[in-house]
Amino acid sequence: MENISNQYIEDAIQNLAESIGIKDYVDENEIISLVRQSKVKESIEEIAKYLKLPIKINLSYVPKGYRPENTNTFHSSHLVKTDWRGRGSEGIVAQISIPSCLPMYGSSGLNNFQISVRVSENCTDRPATFIAVIAHELSHIVLHSIGHKEKDNEIYTDITAMMLGFSDITRQGRRVIETSTSVTTETTVTTTYGYLSDENFYFAFDKVEETLRRHKQDNNKIISKIKELAIKLKDGRKEIICFRKYLEYVDKHLNRKISQEDGYKISTFHQPGYYEELEQEIYKIERDLKKISSFLQSSNHYISSTIKKYEERINAADNNIDSKYDKLYSDVKILKKHVSLIYRLKVFIR
């Protein structure tokens, strides 16, 4: 495993944040429990589910004594396994076959789509390592199903697994150190999984954390903006009520002195459905905001384009409401001049 530049890693993370997004860390406890119970197929399907791959797994096993140079045993082109001398060791191995007819990511065609997975017989020995390996292999499916230009790039595949919630469990499981002792010697074998060097991995780990934190902050800013807009919409509803109450009052007290300019304005307020369109728009925006807020608060998957899209929709709604509220507040101000203080207080209390 040769070091690649940190800039390459950073560019890959930015690219993947825009194409697949970034997720909160997976809660690996349930998956680890399944692995420890030797429920291998179920554990793979749980990992797939977190990657938003609702697939079905056809599972088979290969001997644990795999070595890259032995063509008679299982060979995974998606896995790097080395000891301290760069030789293959008897680590956990896995291979996923990618069909040419793979449905698109997020489409209904992926539901229960059959994927063949082969793992070594010792795959349950180290649950964290097994989860990291499978997350990497399934990330190939993710990249192929979205037609990503780097779908066969192992660096991008490692980073994809990290971006989609398996960063911490990969940190825990990517390196296994085993020590054996004989009468005269002590032998240590280190098996490293994945295609990132230690330096590359920890740089990527920090960048993924930073990217996740930034996306969550952007997500929370939108939720806060929605709350602010919801208050503004509620105030608008109240202002429409004031408008109608004040207009009723003015109509009943025509003996009050009203300027010609105000009289002309007030006469236009009697047009049918004068503020019905605004009320309907307020209702529509409130309904839309509830859906967006519910989605953002329940989601643990943050996609740059999605966050930007919602931000633009909310800003557009806010600007639209502001322009229409300017007219509403102006109309209420005209009526307010001709409504008694006591009546205004009654309306306010209601």
Image: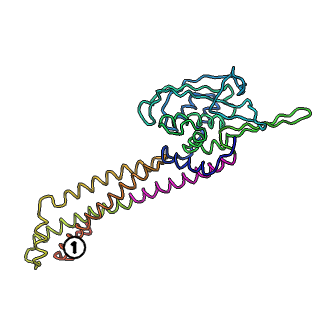
Indicate the secondary structure of the residue bearing disc 1: helix
Question: Along the line of sight, which residue is nearer the eye, 292 or 203?
Answer: 203
Provide residue 145's location: percent of width, then percent of height.
Answer: 48, 34
Provide residue 344's location: percent of width, then percent of height.
Answer: 22, 73
Q: Is residue 329 left or right of residue 93?
A: left
Q: Quadrant of residue 238?
A: bottom left
Question: Which residue is located at x 35 percent, y 60 percent?
Answer: 229
Quadrant occupied by the C terminus:
bottom left
Q: Main secondary structure of the magenta part?
A: helix
- Does 213 appear in magenta? yes
Question: Along the line of sight, which residue is nearer the eye, 267 or 80?
Answer: 80
Task: Classify 224 as above or below 208.
Answer: below
Q: Quadrant of residue 277?
A: bottom left
Provide residue 94's location: percent of width, then percent of height.
Answer: 63, 29
Provide residue 71's location: percent of width, then percent of height.
Answer: 69, 22
Question: Which residue is located at x 51 percent, y 39 percent?
Answer: 149
- Does 162 appear in magenta? no
Task: Classify 232 as above or below 179.
Answer: below
Q: How is the image coloured?
A: rainbow
Instruction: Identify the residue under disc 1.
Output: 333
Question: Along the line of sight, which residue is nearer the eye, 114 or 42?
Answer: 114
Quadrant occupied by the N terminus:
top right
Question: Which residue is located at x 49 percent, y 43 percent?
Answer: 20
Q: Is residue 47 left or right of residue 111?
A: right
First to last magenta residue range: 198-226
